[in-house]
Image: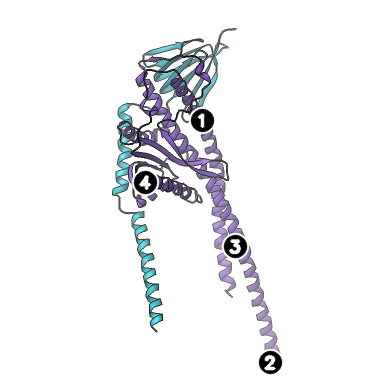
Chain colours: A purple, B cyan
Amino acid sequence: MAGAKEIRTKIASIKNTQKITKAMEMVAASKMRRAQDRMLATRPYAAKIGNVIGHLSHAHPEYRHPYLVERELKRVGLIVISTDRGLCGGLNINLFKKVIGTMKQWHDDGLEIDLTLIGSKSNAFFKRMGGNIRATATHLGDAPSMSELIGTIKVMLDAFEAGEIDRLYIAHNEFVNTMTQKPEVRQLVPVSGEADTEELKTHWDYIYEPDSVPVMDALMIRYIESLVYQGVVENVACEMAARMIAMKSATDNAGDLINELQLVYNKARQAAITQEISEIVSGAAAV
Amino acid sequence: MAMTLHIDIVSAEAEIFSGTATMVFAPAEMGEVGISPRHTPLLTRLKPGEVRVQTDDGEEQSFFVSGGMLEVQPHVVTVLADTAIRADSLDEAQALEAKERAEKLLSDKTADVDYAKAQAELAESIAQLSAIRKLREKVK
């Protein structure tokens, strides 16, 4: 049996670890609440733009934007959004598994793939995996700002406009609730025409100032950007939730470990005392 | 009661204002526009400037936008405000930066690639060693 002193040191060290995981859990919990608020705050913008685009597709403008037109598939673009830091359970791994699965399918269909990576973890992963990486962005922090994403998104949108990629997808974790995060791969461009049909009864069009083309361009770019931004913000909320859960289970495990070790320690201590007594008794008997 | 319209000012990062107004002024690309209720549908870009909202109790509230889009429907006005300062040249520069980061990532051979490689080699050597050991035991 291990010495009582070693067990005591081990218990102390596990207690320290437990304190750290407990602190991380609480930090993640409070950050998660803020991230969730931020996630909800991004919804109106995307919804409004979605509405306007819905109106536009019904208003029969003389100009069909390239982002609305399906093309023959040869090459696809994929934006992968991961976290910057680890210690958040299987969040990134689950996403990467899904992405790899999807990429394999595309590969089997004879499609080539271009990647854009957001977050350090995806950078490290796809660097090792290999792949045609077009652009990256890292260290966006807990409150990502739109201005840090514009360039990264523009690379892919430019590639789409230049005909280098024929479809653009986005992969990120979807926040279902605190316990569940679902990895999701969705199509961004061409924008799938799921606009509401209730407005069909009247034919009307906007007045465009200065002209419909630049206005549509600006609108579509903002729409795509807002979708990507939403993905990034949602992923932050997922990261915090996953970290909170991971740290909670780490804290619980540390507690179990301490209990077990305490039991072993008590037994060792008792055995030592018993041994000492029997030594004294036998020593006294020998005298 | 005066006719009113509903105005929403939203940015990608947050909802800024939502309420009713009798008149809205916005810095459109072709010059400042004033929107009254039952304005014809209009879609235009905004320049950086001030969006002023006259609420139905006669007060005026103003919001600064660094550009964006303005959508007008007879009774609904939506300002899609930009949170970042936009200019084609600026966007281009940022896109270039993002590309450079990707190139740097690929050319940077140090850090975790080396670590991963070393780990793989270590695992391989361990496997070889254990195979040799087993072979030796068999020979004995």
Q: Is residue A96 visible?
A: yes
Quarter holding the C terminus of chain A is bottom right
What element does badge 4 sit on?
Answer: helix
Which amino acid type is shown beneath numbered disc 4?
Answer: His
Q: Nearer the viewer, mark 3 or mark 4?
A: 4
Where residue B55 appears, as percent x and y from the top left, is: 54, 14
How crowded pointer 1 is (Cα within 10 Å; few <14, some 14-19, many 20+) is rated as some
Q: Is residue A262 left or right of residue A52?
A: right
Q: Chain of mark 2?
A: A
Q: Chain of mark 4?
A: A
Residue highlighted by disc 2: A286
Q: Chain of mark 3?
A: A
Which amino acid type is shown beneath numbered disc 1?
Answer: Arg
Residue under disc 2 on the same chain as residue under disc 1: yes
Residue highlighted by disc 4: A107
Which amino acid type is shown beneath numbered disc 2?
Answer: Ala
Which tag, 2 or 1, sits closer to the chain's start?
1
Q: CA distance from mark 3 to mark 1?
A: 44 Å
Residue under disc 3 on the same chain as residue under disc 1: yes
Residue A82 disc label: none
What element does badge 3 sit on?
Answer: helix
Q: Nearer the viewer, mark 2 or mark 3?
A: 3
How crowded pointer 4 is (Cα within 10 Å; few <14, some 14-19, many 20+) is rated as few
Residue highlighted by disc 3: A257
